Image: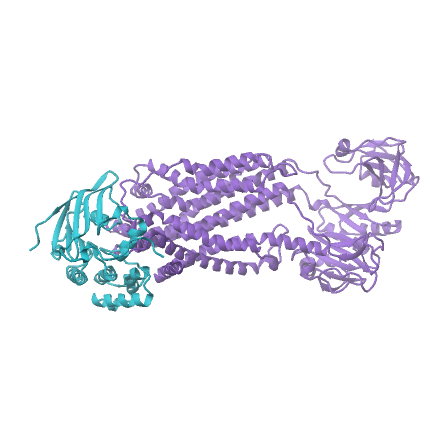
Amino acid sequence: MKQWFTDLALGVRLALGGGRTSWVRLALTGAGIGIGVAVLLASASVTTVLSERDERQAANAPVTGEQTSGDVLYSTFWFTEYRGESITGRFVKGSGPDAPVPPGMSKVPGDGEVFVSPALAKLLESPEGELLRERFPQQLIGTIDDVGLNTPHDLLFYAGDATVPEDDGTAISRFGGQLTERALDPVLSLLVMVGVVALLFPVLVFVGISTRLAGAERDRRLAALRLVGAGSQRVRRIAAGEALLGAFVGLAVGTVLFFIGRQFVDDIQVLGLSAFVSDLTPSLPFAVMIAVLVPVMAVVTSVIAMRRTVIEPLGVVRRAKPVRRVLWWRLVPLVVGVGVLITQAGAFGGSQSRGSAPIVIGGIVMLLLAIPVLLPWVVERAVGRVRGGAPSWQLAIRRLQLESGTAARVVGGVAVVLAGGIALQSVMASAQSEVMDSPGPEVDRGRITINLRESTPELVEQTAGLVARTAGVAEVHTLRNLGFKAGEDDYHSAFVGNCEALRTQAVLPSCQDGDSFYVETAFSRGHRSLLKAGQRVTMFEDSTGDQREGPQWTVPEFTVVKPPSESINFQSGLLLTPSVARAMPVEPESSNLLVLIDQDERDVAEHVRNAVAPITWRSYVSYFGEADVSQRVEQFQSIRQGLLAGSLITLLLAGASLLVLALEQVRERRRPLAVLAASGVPRGALGRSLLWQNAVPLLLALVVAVGVGGALAVLLLRIMSQPIVLDWPGIAVLSGAAAFMVVVVTVLSLPSLRRATGALGLRSE
Amino acid sequence: MNDGGFTRGPGPVDGPGPVKVLLEAVDLHKAFGPTPALDGAGLSVRAGEVVAVMGPSGSGKSTLLHCMAGILTPDKGTVRYRDVELSAMGDGQRSELRRTEFGFVFQFGQLVPELSCLENVALPLRLGSVKRKEAESRAREWLERLEVSDVADKRPGETSGGQGQRVAVARALVTGPRVVFADEPTGALDSLNGERVMQLLVTAAKETNAAVVLVTHEPRVAAYSDREVVVRDGRSREMEPVT
C-alpha cells in the first residue's frame, strides 16, 4: 500500500513539476473539470429544492375540521392578480389569544393589520406597485419569514379581518399537514429526463476531455518512466496520481464556483420558479457520487488514453500503416439505444405512464454515447478517401489521415451537445405545435366577472355602483346564480338577471320579465342532458361553497337560445328573469357582476380589482383577457429559448475544450510546424490547414449529430405519442453556432501557431 | 510492491574463469508492417566490454538495441540475459530488469522534463524503493562524478545539451547496471561535448564493470568501443578488433 501512495505522490509531483507549463495545464484541467462539477452540483440540488419546497408547503398547510378545545384561527383563502402575477393570501381572525399563528409570522394579525411576504412588500414599495397599494389598505406590521413561504418570490399575505365567517369550514386548528407525493406529468418527466441527460452527458464528456489535456506530453513522460524500469501497473498508478490531482483541483474549483453562484440563486426566477439559497444544497448521495465519479472518471479516462504507451516504453512504435478502426462494436450503443427506445413507444403517451424511466434514460445515454464512439470511424473513413486540393487542404487531410482519433474525440463532445439540443428542441417544438393547433376556447377580453360570496342585495348593489364608477368600465350587470341537480351526476346552473344582463349571456330573440331561456353551448351539447320543462330538480342551498341539497323545484317553460359566440367559452344553463326566480324555493347566495370594459383603457382590470378590494374575501375577480393561448405559446417559446440557451452554454463549454485541445495540438506539433515554416510554407497556409483540421471533423460531427439527434427526437416523440416535428430552425442555429465556434477556435489558436512556427520552435530540447 | 520476478544475484559474469556472455541476441527478425527492420541479426555482449553497433540510417541498429533491452519483442529469434530468455519474461519482470540491470542513454527525450536533474537521476532508485534521502545522496554523487552537480536543481529544459546528456548518463549508471544501452548518445552534441560525454560514460562504465551497447554511426564515437558490429539491411557482422 505504501508503494501505491509513493506512486500516486510521484504522479502528483509530475503534474506539478513542469513549472509554468504544468501550472497552466493544471489550471486548465481544474477550470474545465470545475465548470462540469459546478453544473453537476447544481443538478444534484434539484431534488433538495423540490423536497424542501414540498416540506415547507406541507408545514404551511392549514388543518381544518379537527375537533379542538383551544382557540382556532378563522380564515378564508383569497387570491388576486396584479399585471399577470398571482397574489395569494388569507383573511384571518383569531378566536382568542392562543389561536394558531401561521408559519413565518410572530402573531396573528388583528383587524386591519397585514403581514406580507418580502417579495410582496418589495412590490408594494416599488413604483410599479403603486396601483396595488390601494388593494392593501391594511397596516403593514411585518414580513413573513422564509419558513412561511414556498419560494423567495412568493407574493403572499395574511390580513386580519373581523368579518371572516366563523364556522367549522373556516376554523384552522393548526398548521402542518401531510406531505403529499406529487407525481410529475409523464410527458414532463420525460422532458426532464431528456434535458438532464442531454445537458449533463456532455459535461461528463468534457470532464473526460479535460483529463486528457496535454496527453501526448504526459505519454512521453510516462514512457520515459517505463524506460527506466517502472512496470505497467506502476505507470498506471503514477498516471492516476496525475489525473487525480487534476480531478481534485477540479472538484475544489467546481465546489467554490457552485457556492459562489448559489449566492445569487434567490434573485433568479425562471418561469415563475425560484428557490431559496439554503434549498440549493446537493443531496448527500448525489454529492458523494460526484465526489467519487469525477476522480474515477478522470483516472479511467487517463488510463485508457495511455494504454498504448504503457505497452511501448519511450513510445518506440513504428507502424507502416495505422490500424483501421472496426465498425461493428461501434454500432452496439446505437443499436442498443434505438432498440431500447423503440420498446417504450407510446409508453409515456397518455395521462398515465406505462414506461420505465430507467430504460428510457438508458436508451438516451446509449444513443448519445453512440456519437463519440462512432465519430472516429466516420472521420477516418471520410478523410481516408479524400485526395488532392490546395497545400493547406492537403496538409490538413494528410494529418487527419495519419491520426484522426484526437480530432474525432474533440468534436465528439460538441456533437453530443448538438444531438441533445436537437432532440430537446424538436420535442419542445412538437409540444408547442400541439398547443397552437388545438388552442383552448377563446376568451372574451371585453368582460370581467366578479363573483360575490355571501352577498346581500345591498352589498351587490353597492359593489356594482363602485365598479360602474371605475375608469374603463362601460356597463355593469348583475347575475345571481344557483345550482341544481337534475339526476345522478347531472348538475346544472341557473342565472337570474334582468333582460339586459341575460343578453350578455345569450342571443335572446325577445325578452321580458317572466321569460325563461336555456342557453346551450357547443360543450354542453355533448356533455349535459337537455333539461325539460316541468322536470323536477333538486336545488342546492349554496351554489359556491358546500353544496347542500335543498328543496325540489320544477323547471319552467323555456326557449333554447345560443350563446353570443360559439368560439368563446360561455356557460350553459337556465337564464331566468327576476319574476321567474321569485318562485324558486331558495335565495341565491352568490352573485356575479358582469363588467363590460373598454379594452383600450390601460390597467382597467387592476382598477376594477381595486374597486372591489374593500369587500375583501367576498369578491373574486376573473379576467381571462390576461391569460390566453398566445401566453401558453409564449411560455413554450421561453422554455425553448431557455433550452437553446442551455445548449449554447454547453456548446461554449465544448468550444473551450476544443480551443484548449487545438492549442495543445499546436504545441505538440511545434517542431514539424516550425520546420514547415522554415522551409517556406506560408503561415497563412498553415493557419488554413489548422482551420480545415478543425472544420472537417466538425462537419462530419454535425452530420452524425443531426442524424442521431433527429433519430432521438423521433424516438422520444413516438414514446410520448406526439406528432413528429423536427425543429429545423433550432438545428440551423445550433449547427451555425458550432461552425462559428470552429472559426473562433481557429482564430484564437493562430497566435500560438505563430509562436510555434517561429525560430524557437525548431529547438528540440 | 514488486512488479516482476527478476531478482538480481550472482550470475555467470561474477564467477571465476573465462568471461561468459552476459547478453546474447540470436537470429533476430523484426518487421514494422511490411518493412523488415531485422533479418537474422545477432549480437553477444560480455561483462565490462563496450560494443559499438554501427551502420547506416535505417539499417536496423536501433531496433536491435531495443530488442536486446527488452523494449521491443522480436518476431523471431531469442534474446538471453544471463541465460534467461527475455521473451519468456512478463512485463513486470522486464520492467524490473530495465530498472536494476540495465541503463539507458538516448540522443534526447529520455529525461522527465517535470523533475529536476537530481530527481531525474534519483528516479530509478526511488522506483526501486530506495528512500528519498539516500536516493538523492547517491544521485548527487553521480552528478559530481559526471561534473554536472551545478545543474542538480535545474530542470532538463534549463540545461545545455551536453549537461543534459551527462545527467542522462548519471541516471543510466546510478543503479549500478550490468549493461548500459546508449543510442546515438552524442547525436545532438557538438564534437567537444560529445567527446566529453563519451569519456565520462566509458570511464564510469569501466569502473563499475558495466557493459555498454553503443549504437552510433560516427567512427569517432565508435573508437571508444572494445569491438564493433556492423548492421546492414537487418543483418549484423562482427568487425575486426579495433587496434
Screen quadrant of the N terminus of chain A: bottom left
Residue in the foreground of this view, choosing between A484 and A642:
A484
Query: x%, y% of residue A14?
Result: 36, 59
> In the image, is A662 to the left or to the right of A567?
left
User: Is residue B153 among the parts visible in the rendering?
Assistant: no
- Residue that appears at 40% across and 45% down: A409
Query: x%, y% of residue B173?
Result: 23, 61
User: Is residue A398 among the parts visible in the rendering?
Assistant: yes
Eyeballing the image, is A337 above or below B125? Answer: above
Quarter of the view holding residue A146: bottom right
Residue in the foreground of this view, choosing between A308 and A91:
A308
Tell me the colour scheme of the image: by chain
- Residue that appears at 51% across and 34% down: A339
> In the image, is B135 to the left or to the right of B182?
right
> In the image, is A17 to the left or to the right of A473?
left
Screen quadrant of the C terminus of chain A: bottom left
Quarter of the view holding residue A109: bottom right
Question: Chain A takes which shade in the image?
Answer: purple
Residue in the foreground of this view, choosing between A558 and B122:
B122
Residue found at the very far front of the displayed protein: B16
Query: x%, y% of residue B4?
Result: 32, 53
Which chain is cyan in the picture? Answer: B
